[in-house]
Amino acid sequence: MPDLERLLRSTLEEVGSAYEPADEAAARERFLKRKRARRFRLAISGVAVTAAAVAAALFVFSVPATEDEPLPSAAAPQPVATIGVGDEPISASAGDAGVWVAEAGAESVRLIDPNTNEVRAVVPVGRDAQGAPDEVDAHPEGDVWIVTDTGWVTRLYGDPPGIEGTSRSSGERLVARTDVHLDIAATPDGMVAVEPAAGELYFVSDGGEGPPNPAEADETSTEGWSPTDVAHAAGRTWLLDGSMGEVRALSDPTGEPVGEFAYRLDLPVGNAIPSSRAAGGGDNADLAATDDSLWIATGTGGSLFRIDLTTGDIDVEHEVGGRYTDLAVEGNTVWALTGGDGPSMLRQFDAASGRVVGDPLEMSGRPTDVTAADGSAWVTDGDGANVVRVDPSPVTDEEAEAPEDDEAAALIDPDDLVFAFSEHGDIYVQPRSGDPIRLTDTRRKSEVNPTISPEGDAIVYEVEFEGLVRLDLISGESQDLGEGSNPSFEPEGSFAWVVNNGGDPEILIGPPGGAPERRVSVGDCASETGDTSGPAEMCPTIVRNLTWAPDGSALYYEAGWEFGFPLYQLQIAEGSQPFDLGEATGYEIGGDVISYSAPTAVTEDSIHVVRSCCTQGADQDPTSHEFGSIRFTEGGREYEELFDLGVLDAIATDWQAVSLGTWTLREDGTWEESTESTWLISDSTALWVVDESGDATAVRDPGPGPGGDVFAFKGLAARR
Amino acid sequence: MVVESGVRLAERTDIERERDIAALFDRHYAPLCRLAYVILGDAGLAEEIVMDALLKTYNSWGRIRDHARSDAYLRRAVVNLCRSKIRRKVIERRVNQETYKRDERKAPAWDAEIHETKRLVWEAVKKLPDRQRAAVVLRYFEDLPEAEIAEILDCAQGTVKSQLSKARAKLEKELMPQLTAGRGS
C-alpha cells in the first residue's frame, strides 16, 4: 500500500484543481441579486404575510371543490364538426386566419377556416432531408412558424400567411443536428424555440421578407437552466424547466435575446415535468397562459396546476391522469387534452375560477393536439386524418360564483380532537375515530407546526417563510396573525411564538394576534448563558419546538444553528433569562456526542426528551436513541431513561414528540383515553405512538411527499 | 441631530457591510466552491451550497463579532451544509430512489490520463461517512491542523483525530485489494 496520506493529498489536490466554478461573474451577480431580494423580502414580510396567508386560507375553505367537483353546466362539451385533413395531423395552432394544422405524414400544413369548417389552404412543408412537420405555432399578430422533426424551420408570412404562394419561406435549419424535437412559441415579432434535449433556447426574428436566417437564430444563455417548454401569452414568453419544475418568464417578448428573467416559480420537484414531445405519445407536458393565470400540465402523473399570476401561488390543482397533456387557451376557457393511459379525454376549465366545467369528453381515434379558436376546441386525430371541432359547455354567471359561506360546517368537533400534525406541508387533525382530517391543501405553501388552543376550538399554524394563521375549527374561518413561526399555546390560553428579527430570533409571549407582552432575545449569547467567550457564530439563529410547562411557569425550546440544537428553559418569572439545559455534563462523552431533542414539558419541573447518541463508528447518524425524562431539582437535574427507541432511519434533530396524555390507539383504529401515558413521536418518516412499556406503533407512514420530500412531519400538537 | 447621526451611522454600516460581503465573495467564492466540490463531488451542488453559505453569512453579518475571521465562519458554513446535504442525499436515496434525481451534468469527467489509483482513491473518499469525509478533505486538501478542523466540525480535537484515523483505516481496507490487484496485473 503506497503512503496513503501522500496519495490523499495528491488526489484531492488534483480533484480540486481539475474543477473550476462555472462563470464566477454570473454567480456574483446572482449572489448580489439574491442578497438584495432577501433584504427586500425581510423589509416587506410584515405586509406580504397578510395577503399570502389569507389567500391560502381562502382557497382552502371558500373554494373547496376545485379538485374534482365540476361547475354545473347545461351541457358537456360536444363535437360539432369533423374536418378531413392530410395524413397524420400532429399539431394545431390558432392564428388570425384560422386553425393551422401540421401534418407529419402529408408533409404539409393546412389552414382551416372556422367560419366554414373547410380547408382553405395547403402549404407543403419539410420535404426530403428536412424531415416531417413536427409543430406549428401561429401568433394572431405575427406569422406562422413550423419546425420539422430534424430542426428545420419554416415561416409563413403575408396576409393571410402562406396563402399567396410567394409568402412562404423555408429551408433553414435551426439546430445543427438530427432527430431533435423543438418546442416553439410564435411571438408578435418572431419565434422562440427551446430544444428540450439540450436545454437550449433560441430567439428567431421574423426575417423581414426573406427566409429566417440561421444567423438570426440567436442562442441565449440559460445559465445552466434547462428550458423544456415555451409558451407566449399575456405579452410574455413563458419557459418551463421540466426537470426541475421551474417556470420563468422573459421580460421582453420581442424576440431579442433577453437574459433577464422577470419571474421564477419553483414547483415541487416531485412534480417534475418531462420534456414536451409532440402530442400523441410518450411523456408530454404543456404550458399555457391567460392574462392572469399560468397553466402547467405535468406529463407522467397527470397533474394540472394553475398559478395565479397576481400572487405567484399555485392555487388550483387537478388530477387529470394520462401520460401526456396538451393545453389550449382562449378567453376564459382552458382546454386540456390527455391520453396515453386509457381513453383520451378532453376537459374544459374555467380560467377565472380554475374549476372544471361539465364532464370530460372522451375522444376517439388518436388525438395528438388541441388548440382553441373561434370559441371552440380543435383536436387533431393522428389516426383518422381529421380535426374534430368541439364546442364548450356553457357556464352561467351564477354557476361560476364561489360557494356560499353559510355552507361552512365545523371542521372537527373539539371534543373529538385528539392531536394535530403537519404532514408534507399540510395540516391535519386526528379525530377519535377515522382517518386524519386534512385542513389545508396548498401545494405551493408549507403549513407546519400546528398548536391547539386550550379549548380545542382553534389551531394556530405556521406558513413557512410567511407567518402565522389562526384557524377556527368551528367556523372554518382563518385569520392572519402576522409574522412568526413555531407557535405554542400556553395551557391557560396565552401564547408564544418566534420571530426571526433579521437572523437574531426572539420569542414573543402574548395573546394570539395581539401585541407581545414580553420579548426574549435568544440570539444574544450573553443573555443565555452569560458566557461571552464562545464564538459569536454559535449563537442560535433557529428556535423551534416550543413547549409550555402545564402550569405555564416555564417554556422549553430548542435553539441552534444548522447542527446541534441545545435545549433551553425559560422561566416565565419577570426578568429571568433562558438557561441552557445542555451545558451541564457535556455533550461529549468519550468522544461521542449526546444530544437532546423534542422536548415535551410534562410537569412544572420535568420534561420528556429524545436523547440521541452519535457514534464514532461508520455511520454518522446517531446510533442510539432513547426516550427519557429530565427532572430539574435544586441541586441540578436528573435524567431517567424511559425506554430505548433503538436505531431508526432518522435524523435525531428532526425528531418531534408530544405527550398524548392517556390517549391510546385501539386495535380497531379508534382513540380512547386510558390510564396509561402515551407519547406521539415523529422521526421524520413515520409517526409513532409509544406507550409506557416503550412499544412504538407506527400510525402514519406518509411515504415520500410531492417534492420527493422524506421529511414528512414538521410539527405535532396534542390536546392538553 | 441625534437622529441624523444615527441614520448616517446606519447607512455607513450598511455600505460597509455591502462592501465587505462583496469582497468576501470575490476572495472566497472559488476556493470555497473547490472545497465543497471535493467533499461532494458534485459541481452544481457545490456552487449552490457556497451561494447559500454566503447568503447565510450575509444574514448573520451583524452577529459575527470578529469580521476578520469571517472566512472561518464561511468555511464552517460550507462544510456543515455539505454534511447536511450528504446526509439528506443518503436518506433521500434510501427512501425515494425513484424520484430523486440530482443533476450532476456539471461534474467534470475524469481525464483518461489521470492515474487509475487516484480515481480509486477519490471514489473511496466519496464513500466515507459525511463527518469523516469532511475531516479528510479539511486535513489533506485544505491542510488544516486538527484544532481548526475541530472548530469547523464543532467537535473535540480528539474526535477529529479518531475520525481521521478511522477514515484512513477504512480507505486502506477499501483500497488495498484494488491497488494490490492493479499492481499484480
Image: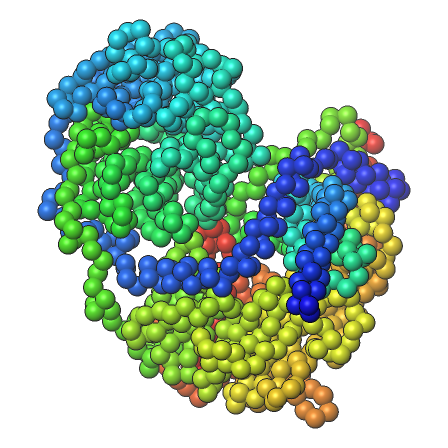
Q: Where does the C terminus of chain A fall, quadrant-wise?
A: bottom left
Q: How many marks?
A: 0
Location of residue A451 by image quarter: bottom left
Locate residue B47 relative to residue B92 in the image: left or right: right
For image coordinates 50% across by 67% down, the residue present is: A483
For image coordinates 66% across by 70% down, the residue present is: A523
Locate residue A102 relative to residue A270 in the image: left or right: left
Location of residue A137 by image quarter: top left
Q: Position of residue A392 (x, y in %)?
A: 17, 39
Location of residue A84 by image quarter: top left
Locate residue B94 relative to residue A471 in the image: left or right: right
Given residues B62 and A523, the one toward you in this image is B62
- A213 relative to A557, above or below: above
Q: Residue furthest bottom?
A: A634
Residue A237, can we see it? Answer: yes
Q: Position of residue A314 (x, y in %)?
A: 39, 50
Q: Position of residue A698 (x, y in %)?
A: 46, 68
Given residues A674 and A267, the one toward you in this image is A267
- A77 relative to B95, above or below: above
Q: Residue furthest front?
A: B1
Q: Position of residue A75 (x, y in %)?
A: 11, 44
Q: Where does the N terminus of chain A fall, quadrant-wise?
A: top right
Given residues B23 and A70, the one toward you in this image is B23
Residue A646, can we see it? Answer: no
For image coordinates 63% across by 46% down, the residue present is: A32
For image coordinates 15% across by 42% down, the residue present is: A393
